[in-house]
Every structure is written in C-alpha cells, then in structure tokens.
Image (cartoon, rainbow, N blue to C red):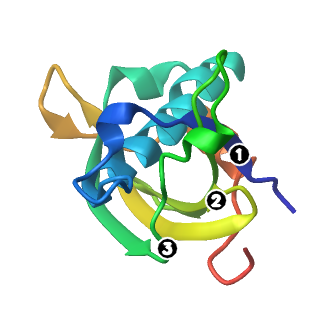
C-alpha cells in the first residue's frame, strides 16, 4: 500500500479571522502549500519536474470539522504554530488526478478536503494528458478511495 505524503505547514498571523481562528478560505492556501510540496518539490526529487510547467484546479471540496486557533502557546521564538497535512492520490485518470487531504491540529483531525487537478499546457492554454513519468510518480501515493 502507498504512503501518505506528510507536510508540516506553518500558520501565519495573517491566516486569522475576526474570531481568532484560521479563516476558512486560508484552508485552501494551506492545502495548496502541501500539494505544491508534493507535486513540485517531491516530483522534482523523483525526477518529474513537469508539474511545475502547469497544473490547474478543476474542483475543490472542503469539510471543516473543527476550528483551528493560531495557538500562541504552541509557538516558540524559533517557530510559529503548525498544522500537519497528510495527502494522497485517490484517483489517476488520463488527464486528471484527484488528491485527498486531512489536516490535523496536533492529533485532532480538523478538516478533510479533495482537489481535482488537470495538467495544463500553459503555452497553448489547453489541458494535457498525464505523462507516463507523472503517472508513475503519482502511483507512489495512490490510495484508492475507500482504502484510506
């Protein structure tokens, strides 16, 4: 079975809303940071740099399970509070990939999300198919829906 990709995401003071919680719209930014780490940095380390050439979002779904505080009590002089984001690939199609996420505040599950991504040729402004190399990389994180 494939492993989840785990990313420790630093929270920023600007992520807060008027209630002192991480704003709901910022959850997508946090998920984006984890996804970019997987696809751009992780892909490049695996020898696949083509995701950085163009990937667009077709769909996002987010379930907010609990509020996330900035929690200054968890901050130190050296680091801000973090959340842990675990992500994996739940579906690979010819011209799209579905990425699932879970966000944890400590050990507490605070959100689940899903994104459908489409590889995109920026110069031609058209979607493209996944390459064999991209598929091979994505399969290392493939946990089919229901198996996660």
Which residue is painted at 65% across and 27% down in the image? 42
In the rendered image of this protein, does residue 77 appear above or below residue 83?
A: above
On residue 39, which mark appears? none
Please state which of residues 60 and 25 is positioned toward the viewer in this rendering.
25
Which residue is painted at 55% across and 47% down in the image? 71
Label 2's element?
Answer: strand
| Residue 54 rendering spot, x and y as whole percentages | 31, 28
Q: Is 148 on the left or on the right of 91, as rendered?
A: right
Q: Earlier in the sequence, mark 3 or mark 2?
A: 3
| Residue 41 rendering spot, x and y as whole percentages | 59, 21
On residue 104, which mark appears? 2
| Residue 33 rendering spot, x and y as whole percentages | 46, 35
Q: Where is mark 3, residue-wise?
A: 66
In the rendered image, the residue lying farthest to the front is 73
| Residue 138 rendering spot, x and y as whole percentages | 63, 45
On residue 5, which mark appears? 1
Q: Quadrant of the C terminus?
A: bottom right
Whole-Å distance between the Cαs marked 3 and 1?
22 Å
């Amino acid at each position: 079975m494939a492993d989840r990709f785990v990313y420790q995401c630093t929270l920023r003071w600007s992520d807060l809303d008027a209630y002192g919680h991480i704003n709901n719209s910022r959850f997508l930014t946090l998920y984006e940071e984890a996804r970019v780490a997987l696809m751009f940095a992780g892909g490049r380390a695996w020898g696949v740099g083509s995701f950085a050439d163009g990937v667009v979002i077709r769909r996002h779904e987010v379930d907010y399970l609990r509020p996330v505080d900035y929690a200054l009590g968890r901050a130190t002089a050296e680091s801000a509070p973090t959340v842990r984001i675990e992500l994996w690939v739940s579906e690979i199609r010819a011209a799209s990939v579905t990425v699932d996420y879970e966000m944890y505040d400590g050990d507490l599950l605070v959100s689940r999300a899903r994104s459908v991504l489409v590889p995109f040729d920026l110069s031609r402004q058209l979607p493209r198919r996944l390459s064999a190399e991209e598929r091979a990389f994505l399969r290392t994180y493939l946990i089919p829906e229901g198996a996660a």
